[in-house]
Image (cartoon, coloured by chain):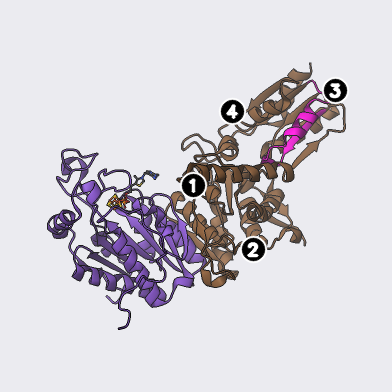
Chain colours: A brown, B purple
């Protein structure tokens, strides 16, 4: 298929349709409202369902209901909205239902601002809602990956019967880039008869299905948590995605960065190369499961003297990087918030202090 | 002689966990009879609330989802929008629906979502041990209103059927009671009608049922029925607040 020029938010909406998702519930919030504005027009053409809920709290449960009933479903929001959806996300994870949440992050905490940020890393990867659960978190670095990851997300959500989050930021949502919609990422919905509440009439066995998260018996609750844990372990084995940049050199510094920030880092690395300074970048594409072993191995390359995590936050992913590097190299941090995206020049300046 | 009375098919064999004399059991039976009579068991999805009916899914043999506190109408919206052929009902208490879930119920009703809500008004939080609900009567004692509900501090009890009946969007909104046999018969008719409207794809339907909580009211089941009759019914007037034909 030929490339088309599209705004990130609209491309995410189109990607969902192309992946086979016909159901979308949402509540407006900048900088991602264009997803809803796009889908309100596109979904009826596809015979799909569009509904603007009364709040993110309600939208979270519209997603839960639709997903429990066995239909592919997505919502998109931005940071404060995701906080409100976190209640439902915890319930959906506990009840083992598949659903896709797109978070186009803006600056926080609180009302914060409307410009891009990566301040929701903790919330996305460490919980957000209550209890022991994880989301599978995909972090695109631009419009093309936002499309691909949105499409992948449905299959992954169904494979694991778990909510999947696409974690982008305001820059990815708002910018226009040429994009291609791959056919090979379209997946078939998995068989839902053994768990979905789609009506007893529709399934072969006459057994009724139950979608729930209450387990008053402690051994049953423990059992449910063990099932969830096993899924997260399987994700760690099967779903890790990452990209290494300029890593076949004798790099002195390894940057870890993701999403929009990683693109700025790439520019800085190219500029440093011209000055004879070799720097590599490790870019996790899955933030959970985090590429633990791979980050470790790339960091301890002999030529590598230090690692620096560069983020549009006050230091969140850096904690995972430190955990993986296990003290074998110094791990530094540089970040800015509030919608300011650090410039390549700033990154070059920081890197030079590390190599001198 | 033929059989004149038997367990509705959709009611499971399980014993319920409800307290002796609690009217939750009566309402369960009425819902089950309606589902049986309309022959919709195979395409019905119930939504359990948070509250004493949290385990309602153990008592109905049909698909069930369990919502978070107050969110059942949003969940029902999700199901019904993506699968309009399913018959969806929520079963919610007054803490669940009129307090934490006030936003969800008003908006679902106002959108005219085509599902059915069974709303148990027992004027108190049952499951958590008798705290004040938005429906608790002035002067009524609750663990969080030990000297009785003070309306200067907490406002007047909310009349959900009256409130939803005010919405302009068409719907079926009624308040019934299960304190006396005649009321039970009427409540049965209302519940069946509520489901019938859904089967016909007509409108949002809401049945408030004035109920008892002998345990948390600190009364015998009989005194609870009497107290409800004397104290609740004058304030929570029975009858239809809205019909789709209006
Ligand atoms: C978010 C949240 N807050 C509080 C609770 C605790 N809680 C459980 S049941 C309940 C009150 C339910 O009362 P009601 O809806 O009147 O139902 P009843 O028990 O009387 O049938 C509360 C506050 C909860 N489960 N979730
Ligand atoms: S606590 Fe009250 S509402 Fe709950 S089962 Fe007992 S009597 Fe019924």
- As drawn, is B185 to the left or to the right of B33? left
Q: Output the chain of dot 4.
A: A
Q: Output the chain of dot 3.
A: A
| For the residues bearing labels 2 and 4, Cβ distance under 8 angstroms | no
The numbered mark, 2 or 3, whose residue comes first in the sequence reads 2
What is the number of the mark on residue A85?
A: 1
The numbered mark, 2 or 4, whose residue comes first in the sequence reads 2
Label 2 element class = loop
Q: From which residue to which does the magenta span run?
A: A279-305
In space, the residues marked 4 and 1 are separated at their CA atoms by 23 Å
Mark 4 crowdedness (10 Å alpha carbons): few <14, some 14-19, many ≥20: some
In space, the residues marked 1 and 3 are separated at their CA atoms by 45 Å
- Residue A236 occupies which quadrant of the picture? top right
Q: Which residue is mark 4?
A: A314
Label 1 element class = helix
Label 3 element class = loop
What is the number of the mark on residue A191?
A: 2
- As drawn, is A43 to the left or to the right of A301? left
In space, the residues marked 2 and 3 are separated at their CA atoms by 49 Å
What is the number of the mark on residue B72?
A: none
Image vertical order of residue B182 relative to residue A105, above or below: below
Residue name at image x 85 percent, y 22 percent = A302
- Residue A298 occupies which quadrant of the picture? top right
């Amino acid at each position: 298929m030929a490339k088309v020029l599209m705004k990130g938010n609209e491309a995410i909406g189109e990607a969902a349709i192309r992946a086979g998702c016909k159901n979308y519930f949402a509540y407006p919030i900048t900088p991602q409202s264009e997803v809803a504005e796009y889908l309100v027009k596109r979904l009826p053409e596809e015979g799909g369902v569009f509904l603007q809920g009364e709040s993110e709290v309600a939208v979270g449960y519209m997603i839960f209901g639709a997903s429990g009933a066995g239909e592919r479903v997505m919502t998109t929001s931005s940071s404060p909205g995701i906080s409100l959806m976190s209640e439902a996300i915890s319930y959906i994870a506990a009840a083992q239902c598949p659903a896709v949440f797109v978070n186009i992050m803006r600056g926080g905490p609180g009302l914060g601002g409307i410009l891009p940020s990566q301040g929701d890393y903790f919330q996305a990867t460490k919980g957000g809602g209550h209890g022991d659960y994880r989301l599978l978190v995909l972090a695109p670095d631009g419009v093309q990956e936002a499309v691909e990851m949105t499409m992948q997300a449905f299959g992954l959500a169904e494979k694991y019967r778990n909510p999947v989050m696409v974690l982008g930021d305001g820059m990815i949502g708002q910018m226009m880039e040429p994009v291609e919609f791959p056919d090979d990422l379209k997946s078939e919905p998995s068989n839902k008869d053994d768990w979905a509440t789609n009506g007893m009439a529709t399934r072969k066995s006459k057994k009724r299905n139950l979608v729930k998260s209450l387990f008053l018996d402690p051994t049953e609750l423990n059992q449910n948590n063990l099932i969830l844990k096993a899924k997260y372990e399987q994700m760690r084995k099967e779903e890790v995605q990452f990209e290494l940049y300029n890593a076949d050199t004798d790099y002195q510094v390894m940057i870890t960065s993701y999403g929009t920030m990683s693109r700025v880092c790439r520019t800085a690395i190219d500029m440093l190369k011209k000055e004879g300074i070799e720097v590599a970048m490790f870019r996790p594409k899955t933030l959970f499961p985090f590429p633990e072993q791979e980050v470790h191995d790339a960091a301890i390359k002999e030529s590598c003297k230090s690692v620096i995590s560069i983020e549009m936050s006050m230091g969140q992913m850096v904690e995972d990087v430190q955990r993986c590097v296990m003290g074998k190299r110094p791990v530094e941090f540089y970040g800015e918030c509030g919608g300011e995206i650090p410039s390549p020049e700033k990154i070059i300046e920081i890197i030079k202090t590390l190599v001198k | 002689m033929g059989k004149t009375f038997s367990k509705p098919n959709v009611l499971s064999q399980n014993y319920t966990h409800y307290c002796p004399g609690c009217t939750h059991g009566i309402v369960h039976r009425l819902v089950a009879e309606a589902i049986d009579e309309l022959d919709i068991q195979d395409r019905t999805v119930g939504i359990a609330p948070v509250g004493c009916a949290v385990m309602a899914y153990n008592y109905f043999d049909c698909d069930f989802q369990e919502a978070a506190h107050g969110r059942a109408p949003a969940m029902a919206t999700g199901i019904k929008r993506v699968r309009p052929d399913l018959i969806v009902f929520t079963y919610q208490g007054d803490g669940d629906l009129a307090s934490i879930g006030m936003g969800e119920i008003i908006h679902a009703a106002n959108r005219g979502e085509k599902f059915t809500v069974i709303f148990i008004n027992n004027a108190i939080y049952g499951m958590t041990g008798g705290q004040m609900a938005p429906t608790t009567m002035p002067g009524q004692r609750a663990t969080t209103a030990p000297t009785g509900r003070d309306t200067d501090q907490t406002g007047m009890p909310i009349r959900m059927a009256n409130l939803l009946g005010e919405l302009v969007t068409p719907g079926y909104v009624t308040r019934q009671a299960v304190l006396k046999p005649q009321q039970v018969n009427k409540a049965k008719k209302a519940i069946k009608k509520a489901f019938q409207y859904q089967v016909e794809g007509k409108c949002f339907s809401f049945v408030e049922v004035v109920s008892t909580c002998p345990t948390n009211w600190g009364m015998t089941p009989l005194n609870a029925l009497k107290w409800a009759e004397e104290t609740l019914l004058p304030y929570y007037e029975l009858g239809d607040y809205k019909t789709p034909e209006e």
